Image (cartoon, grey):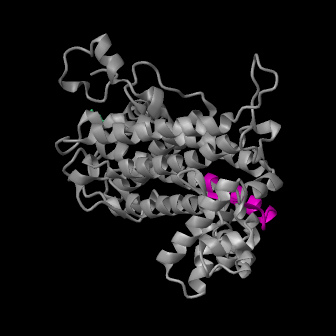
Amino acid sequence: ASAQLWGGRFASGPAEAMAALSLSTHFDWRLADYDIAGSRAHARVLHQAGLLTDDELRRMLAALDQLAADVAAGTFTPVPADEDVHTALERGLLERAGKDLGGKLRAGRSRNDQIATLFRMWLRDAARRIAEGTLDVVDALVSQATAHPDAAMPGRTHLQHAQPVLLAHHLLAHAQSLVRDVDRLRDWDRRAAVSPYGSGALAGSSLGLDPAAVAEELGFTSAVDNSIDGTASRDFAAEIAFCLAMLAVNLSRIAEEVIIWTTSEFGYAVLDDAWATGSSIMPQKKNPDVAELTRGKSGRLIGNLTGLLATLKAQPLAYNRDLQEDKEPLFDSVDQLELLLPAIAGMLGTLRFDTARMAASAPAGFTLATDIAEWLVRQGVPFRVAHEAAGACVRAAEARGVGLDELTDAELADCSPHLTPEVRTVLTVQGSISSRNARGGTAAERVAEQRDRLVDVVQAQ
Ligand code: ARG
């Protein structure tokens, strides 16, 4: 017998390096509240099964309440001999309830079903916080879209000027992907809301305990169907690691654009002082560190996902100690996002756009060439021919160093006999933008509708 929960069959305690390797309280202590919640639920099913008297249940719950209060106050903390959060709290319970009563709580449960349950509980709460933080970023994007309802910019493909679009349309494109990230987290929760408590080490309990009652008390929708699966599976962890990595990758795409937009070459936007940093040597610098840390940390979250998948790969059923490696990557992904999300929301919400400069560059690079081709199509010209003619206009304008709108009537007619001066109606950025008025398009009224739907999503939460 020793400080361990498993000392009975051992003549000696663990070697120092063994104990050091085994230790997990430095990261799993954050599960302490969930562990105690699980213990309360477990005490109740032991009582229901006739394994605790009314008085024992009352004293057990009182001891657990005292333990929870001491944990919250920081007056109870793990000591080096506590292998993990479960061991530490067991010690705390024995100290408060006495060895005889406290020692009854372990019946019918194992650290294997405990950890699988507590980790799900922690992640479900984390997913809700991350979803909220993500919607704050969506809110910042929606506010900027609302503040700039008709600012034009060059839309890009391959980073090259492609077609003029509204800045609001572009910002809301990012909002759409973030809303899907939130949706993914909520969808994940339906699968994660299943409790392994009562699975025991792997085979289930022989003591007449009611896993469904524990599941309900802990906020799950049901208990697992299979105790081996309940203790061995971690796809719930890998799945949310993906959801979080995807969110980080989506954020990194916004971040990259902020980094580009705030360069001298682009000059599309200026960072607010509160969301930028300076240089220790170059007095003029204003650096987009929030965006760069977002871009950088997205790599870290991808690593957390791939690392966890590698840990899970080929593990035989049921529980293996390898599974202890599941927690740090997820804790880290959540911690990093909880640092990033408010900073990104702040940075985006306070970004100042140079809409005049953006609008001026919107037609550059012959972004209205598609409008010439589509205008010709509306005159009955086959698109193949129209594309050729619009391309000829680009060649002519490029040769003379002018914009498409500066071609003379004669030059236009040279490119195609169908190119009458009426084509000039579409040779403006505003004409181009307002003509793309089908659902999802960049015309102002369509973008406003899209924005309204996003506002509904944010407010529904
Ligand atoms: N600390 C372990 C984990 O995080 C749970 C304990 C199970 N340990 C054991 N030897 N069965 O997965």
Q: Is residue 249 left or right of residue 113?
A: right
Comparing 45 with 82, the one in front is 82
Q: Quadrant location of ligand 1?
A: top left
* Residue 183 among those drawn in magenta: no
Which percent across, then down, holds residue 188? 43, 60
Image quadrant of residue 367? bottom right
Identify the residue shown where x is 72% and y is 41%. 262
In the displayed image of the protein, which residue is found farthest to the bottom? 380
Identify the residue shown where x is 24% and y is 53%. 229
Q: Main secondary structure of the magenta part?
A: helix
Identify the residue shown where x is 29% and y is 57%. 209
Q: Is residue 276 left or right of residue 308?
A: right
Which percent across, then down, holds residue 82? 40, 24
Q: Quadrant of the N terminus?
A: top left
Comparing 424 with 414, the one in front is 414
* Residue 146 among those drawn in magenta: yes
Which percent across, then down, holds residue 351? 77, 48
Image quadrant of residue 179? bottom right
Total label count?
Answer: 0
Q: Is residue 441 visible?
A: no
Above or below, 97 against 37 in this view is: above
Comparing 220 with 130, the one in front is 130
Span colored in magenta: 133-155
Q: Quadrant of the C terminus?
A: bottom right
Identify the residue shown where x is 32% and y is 25%. 4
Q: Is residue 364 visible?
A: yes
Which percent across, then down, holds residue 306? 35, 40
